[in-house]
Amino acid sequence: MSAAFDLSEFPLVRIHWGKELTIADIDACYDQLIALQQKCVADGSRFVVVSWGADSISSKLRKHIADEAERRVTPKLQRASIATFVVVESPIMRGIVTALKWMSPKMAIIHPVATLEEGVREARRVLAEHGITRVAS
């Protein structure tokens, strides 16, 4: 899989994508995300994701992402995820990510940001707003 999950700063979860993104990568990522959401629902914890790395995402992949969110992320699981900040350097591509939010209401927690630093800063701000402190050591 060309995505690496980093839980070392949980509840801040970092997902670093490889250069080329495939449907298999997206499906494997959803497998890990669903498992994390199930764990969090069971123990009452919540998290924020910062995601970066893929150079381009085709319209076919964008549709697959939205379809998988609709199919796999139940409202109960969704409650574990507070927000996802996706690093998108191009202003045009940030607009495309915003369009994903329109395709799927479950994607409404997705927020495009220009840099990894901005994504981490925003993630920490959102966690603080929810009264959540760092859990992982």
Image (tube, rainbow, N blue to C red):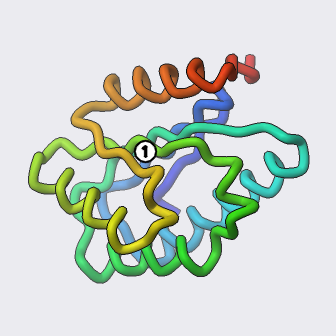
For residue 20, above or below residue 12 = below
**Crowding at mark 1 (Cα within 10 Å: few <14, some 14-19, many 20+):** many
User: Which of the two residues, 75 or 88, is positioned nearer the viewer here?
Assistant: 75
Q: Quadrant of residue 18?
A: bottom left
User: In the image as oriented, which residue stretches furthest toward the right?
Assistant: 42
| Residue 135 location (% of width, % of height) | 75, 22
Q: Position of residue 73 (x, y in %)?
A: 64, 68
Q: Identify the secondary structure beneath mark 1.
A: strand
Which residue is at the front of the view, 20 or 113?
Answer: 113
In this rendering, position of residue 6 left or right of residue 111: right
- Please tell me which residue is depicted at 43% across the width and 44% down the height of the picture: 51
Work out which quarter of the rendered image holds the C terminus and state it. top right
Q: Position of residue 124 (x, y in %)?
A: 51, 21
Three-letter amino acid code at disc 1?
Ser
Say which quarter of the image contains residue 60.
bottom left
**Residue at left 57%, top 22%?**
129
Q: Is residue 86 above or below residue 76?
A: above
Q: How many numbered badges does the structure rendering display? A: 1
Determine which residue is flagged by label 1: 51
Q: Tell me what residue is drawn at x 65 percent, y 57 percent.
A: 78
Query: In the shown orientation, is residue 41 left or right of residue 3?
Result: right
- Identify the residue at horizontal 36%, vertical 62% (top origin): 101
Q: Position of residue 57 (x, y in %)?
A: 26, 67
Q: Quadrant of residue 85?
A: top left
